[in-house]
Structure formats: structure tokens, C-alpha cells
Amino acid sequence: MNTGPSVPLRFAYWVPNVSGGLVTSTIEQRTDWSYEYNVELARLAEKAGFEYALTQVRYTASYSAEYQHESTSFSLALLLATQRLKVIAAVHPGLWHPGVLAKWVATADHLSGGRIAVNVVSGWLKDEFTKLGEPWLEHDERYRRSAEFIQALRAIWTQDRANLAGDFYRIRDFSLQPKPLPVPGRAHPEIFQGGNSTAARNNGGRYSDWYFSNGNDFDGVSEQLHDLERIAAAAGRSERPKFGLNGFVIVRDTESEAREVLREIIAKADTPAVRSFGAAVQQAGASTSDKRGMWANSSFEDLVQYNDGFRTQLIGTAEQVAERIVAYRKLGVDLILAGFLHFQEEVEAFGRTVLPLVRELEAAEALDTADTAAVR
Ligand SMILES: Cc1cc2nc3c(=O)[nH]c(=O)nc-3n(C[C@H](O)[C@H](O)[C@H](O)COP(=O)(O)O)c2cc1C
């Protein structure tokens, strides 16, 4: 069920299309949310060995993110400015009709040579819906809507005439032309999904190509992987969705320097913003009956990084970080989604120092596995 360590680990970075960087802290962040900064970053990232970039979707100011560029248009801009990078555009069911999005994606796919993907986010920020006059559904209903949304996208991209009689969307003999490009290794543009609650796991296990996890330790990742394997098998899928893990990366010459950066980020946290964010995200998994999901048991320190990225502990020297990444790979993680304090310079340094070490360790692992198989 696992995609297995024989496939090299993939890397993605968070696109800083929202102001304020990825930590809610007054520490200096040499990261900018502008178009110009992001084009240069995307070009650096594809050169550094990043396969994917993930844009964020936020429609209105919240928790130290005062300004936001819209995710789908920004994703397309980055695709047109790069050659190989795949860009994952984040979208909310409920604010998009799946047919309209399917059409947008097909066009973006043609314009980019088959490099667009989507991240279906079910929503945790109530204001985003209510201030636009849209209903704020209860948590599991939001995920039921997302399940229909994903099925609608897949049907429209792959069938001549798509039909779906859902509770949220109704598609009748809808024919999309042109379809997305035929690209080896994918049946249609890849569908990622964010969220770790029981409902999110069910959607990931049953319908998504990729499941994104908030930052987590080895046990937390293993537990989610097992759950996804169980759900995918019960749904009759031959493989579980691929697993992307968020991690905030701090690589410095010594471990103590890296730890000192983390200490400073937390010491300079924007406390009121972190506390308000912590209250708002109670709308996520914590609001469900089993209270399982993103941020359901996050500490104040965890919440300083929006997606619990410190928990993954990619903090230390290049060697330490590479070893930890490969340990996650061995558990079954397929992609590391990385955030940084100073994006341009750290993405470039990550490609130069950490990535080659990861590839060396992966090659050594593959040899070990081959040797063990030969002995058997
Ligand atoms: C990697 C990742 C990226 C996400 N990106 C966004 C985003 O850009 N905008 C957004 O509103 N929610 C985003 N989310 C949040 C989720 O879609 C979802 O609303 C939230 O995780 C609640 O999940 P849960 O209750 O299922 O645990 C993201 C989640 C993950 C894991």
C-alpha cells in the first residue's frame, strides 16, 4: 500500500503569497509576499530541486496575515514564470463551483504543460464564509461537501459526460473540452487535500491523490499513515493516497544556532495574534465529536507556525535535518512540505546542503534493501 522508498522523496515549499511569512512572530523575516519576490523564489526552488510549490488561500486579513494574493491566479503566474515546477493551487469547496474550477484547471494545465494541481481545503476560518454571505457549515458537513467536490472534479476531468447528483453539487451531462493534458504518471491534475480530522482522513483515504498533514512527530505520522491505509483498502483502492508532511525548516551551521532561531521565533511571537488564531482553529477537528484533527492539541508554541511545523523538528545542521527527513521517508512519507524564515536564501541553501545528503542517504538505504533482498 506504500509507495515505497524506491521512489525518491519529493519536496514542496509553501508559497508566501500571504504577508507576514509563515510564523506569527515579530522576528525578522526576509520573506516577501510580492509577485516579484515569488517569481524569483519559484525559479530558485525549481533549480534547487523542489518539485512542487503550494499556494495558500485566504480571502481576508487574519492573524498577522494582512495582505493576500489570490491563490489560483498567483499559481498560474508562477507556472508561467517557471519550466518544471508544479504548482498546487489551494481552493475552497463552497466558494468555488467544481465545474468552474475544473475548467480553470484544464486551461491552466494547457498553459503550463501539465503542471497544475489543486489542494482542496475544507475551511476553518468562519469569517471567510460569513463575511461573503455564504453559509458556514458544521465541520463534517464541510468535508462531505469536499468529498463531492473532489468526485466532481475527477468525473469532469476524466469522463466524456460527467454526472453527479449530490447534496451540494449537481452536474448533468457536463462535457469539458479540452480535457487536461495527458501526462505520464497522473490520470488527471493531482488532487491534494489538507486536514487531519476523521472526516479529512476519510476523504483522503477514499478520494484524494495526496493527503497533507500538519507538522507531526514519528508516532503521529505513523498513526495517520495506518489510518489512511485502512480507509483506502476498505474503499477498494489499490494504494493509499501519497502523504505530504509539513515541516518548518531551520538549518544552521550548528544545532545550537538553529535551536536559538526557534527560541527567538517563539520569544517574539505576536501573542494576541497567536491566541486569536488558536481560538479560530477550534472550528477545525477540535469541534468534532472525537476532537481529532489539526490543531486539536496544539500548544501555544506549535501555533506560532500556522501548520504545527515545529513539531516535525527539521531543526539543526544539514546532516541532522537530512537524517530526520529520511527517517520520515522510511515511515512512508512521500513529500516534505517545507516552510522557512527567509525563503529565498534558505530554499537555495536547502537545495545545496540538505537535498544532496537526503539523496545520498536514500541511495544507501536502497542498497541496504537490495543487499537484504539478495541475502534472502
Ligand atoms: C498543508 C496544508 C495546507 C493548507 N492550506 C490551507 C489554506 O491555504 N487555506 C485554508 O483556509 N486552509 C488550509 N488548510 C486547512 C485545511 O484545509 C482544513 O481546513 C483544516 O486543516 C482543518 O482540518 P481538520 O479539521 O480536518 O483537521 C491547509 C491544511 C494543510 C494540512
Image: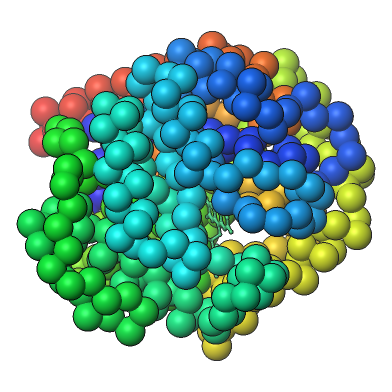
Q: Residue at x 89, y 39 (%)?
A: 26
| Whether residue 185 is visible | no
Front residue of this view, candidates 322 and 149: 149
Q: Position of residue 263 (x, y in %)?
A: 85, 39
Q: Residue at x 18, y 27 (%)?
A: 370
| Whether residue 292 is visible | yes
If the picture is divided into quarters, which one holds ligand 1?
bottom right
**Residue 277's image quarter?**
bottom right
Q: Position of residue 198 (x, y in %)?
A: 45, 75
Q: Is residue 183 above or below residue 231?
A: above
**Residue 106's image quarter?**
top left
Which quadrant is the N terminus positioned in?
A: bottom left
Front residue of this view, candidates 329 and 20: 20
Q: Is residue 214 above or below residue 130?
A: above
Q: Residue at x 23, y 71 (%)?
A: 171
Scheme of colours in the image: rainbow
Q: Position of residue 222 (x, y in %)?
A: 43, 57
Q: Position of residue 341 (x, y in %)?
A: 73, 31
Answer with left or right where residue 144 lies relative to residue 174.
right
Answer with left or right where residue 46 lies relative to residue 180.
right
Q: Residue at x 32, y 28 (%)?
A: 112
Which quadrant is the C terminus positioned in?
A: top left
Q: Is residue 256 above or below residue 181?
A: above
